[in-house]
Image: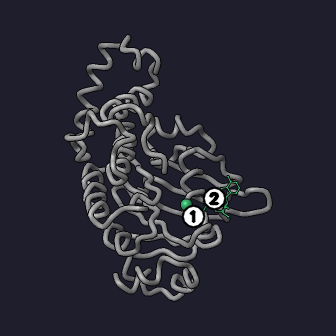
Amino acid sequence: MPILEVEGLSKYFGGLAALNDVNLSIQEGEIRGIIGPNGAGKTTLFNVISGVYRPSSGQIRYQGKTRIDGLSSSRIAGMGVVRTFQRTALYHHFSVLKNVIVARHLHAKENIFRVISGLAKKTEEKNTEKALEIVEFMGLGHLKEELAENLPHGHQRALGVAIAIACEPKVLLLDEPLTGMTPTEKDRMIDLIRKVHQQGITILMVEHDMRSVMELCGYISVLDFGMLLVEGPPAEIQNNEMVINAYLGTEDILSASTSA
Ligand SMILES: Nc1ncnc2c1ncn2[C@@H]1O[C@H](COP(=O)(O)OP(=O)(O)O)[C@@H](O)[C@H]1O
Ligand SMILES: [Mg+2]
């Protein structure tokens, strides 16, 4: 049974169809790659699935029959569909651990001021333990007291994923998790994504780094001009003429796909 089904999904900005009648069926436990040239609608797809935007039309069904299209992002996150953002840390002047603790409290809909001021001591202790577990799981244990703003880029992105994990997702949407990373940081993030996936979390990943997409994803959906161009396993997508043509003239894919 698919964990997430997108049917006839469209999103218009003025006259522009950022998404045009997109259908997707995501199986539980897969790592799905979403690729396509800049402006293809990938981020919009994530924004609509995660409730940042309302779709103009279409349906999004979660775990069978539950419609999540049009619900608020906090409702959707509460149900287990969580996205990461480019801006990673919730609070740049908080420690790594505190960021994850706050994310857990926010997720649990507690009074954030009580949490920050330490008034909700008991709940905080309970959550700190779980937050610490997540921080360590994400390879940030040695940096737990470091301020988020002082982390190197790769670790900031890992914290972004830790914050998303704090919301106990069943489906995790990663928008360009490898962007701006050094090769070492990329390798580390790829390992983390695999580890998260091994926890049973279904992953949807938008990424331009084709080599990593091909390596991580079992199945790939290609968007172009807001439309689903083609879908298939990595080996098929890599050699698909429509995909290669869709990317012609864009800067990032050809070198990546030939070196893959
Ligand atoms: N909030 C918005 N308002 C107006 N246009 C938008 C908005 N968000 C995205 N778009 C437009 O929708 C199209 C798809 O954008 P986006 O989803 O960001 O593409 P991608 O992530 O694939 O690069 C682009 O033409 C973009 O300019
Ligand atoms: Mg984008």
Quadrant containing the C terminus is bottom left
Residue 206's place in the image compared with 222, above or below, is above
Residue 237's place in the image compared with 56, above or below, is below
Question: x%, y% of residue 47?
Answer: 57, 51
- Disc 1/disc 2 C-alpha distance (Å): 7 Å
Q: Nearer the viewer, residue 188 or 238?
A: 188
Q: Nearer the viewer, residue 224 or 87?
A: 87
**Residue at (34% x, 36% y) in the render:** 147
Question: x%, y% of residue 28?
Answer: 37, 55
Q: Amino acid at mark 1?
A: Asn
Residue 235's place in the image compared with 224, above or below, is below
Question: x%, y% of residue 211?
Answer: 35, 75
In the figure, is residue 9 to the left or right of 216? right
Residues under numbered marks 1 and 2 in contact, where contact means CB atoms less than 8 Å apart = yes
Callout count:
2
Q: Which mark is residue 9?
A: 2
**Residue 10 in which image quadrant:** bottom right
Displayed-image quarter of ligand 2 = bottom right
**Residue at (66% x, 51% y) in the render:** 55
Label 2 CA crowd tier, 10 Å (few <14, some 14–19, many 20+): many
Label 1 CA crowd tier, 10 Å (few <14, some 14–19, many 20+): some
Q: Nearer the viewer, residue 236 or 176?
A: 176
Q: Secondary structure at mark 1?
A: strand
**Residue at (51% x, 40% y) in the render:** 76
As drawn, the residue found furthest toward the top would be: 119
In the figure, is residue 141 to the left or right of 40? left
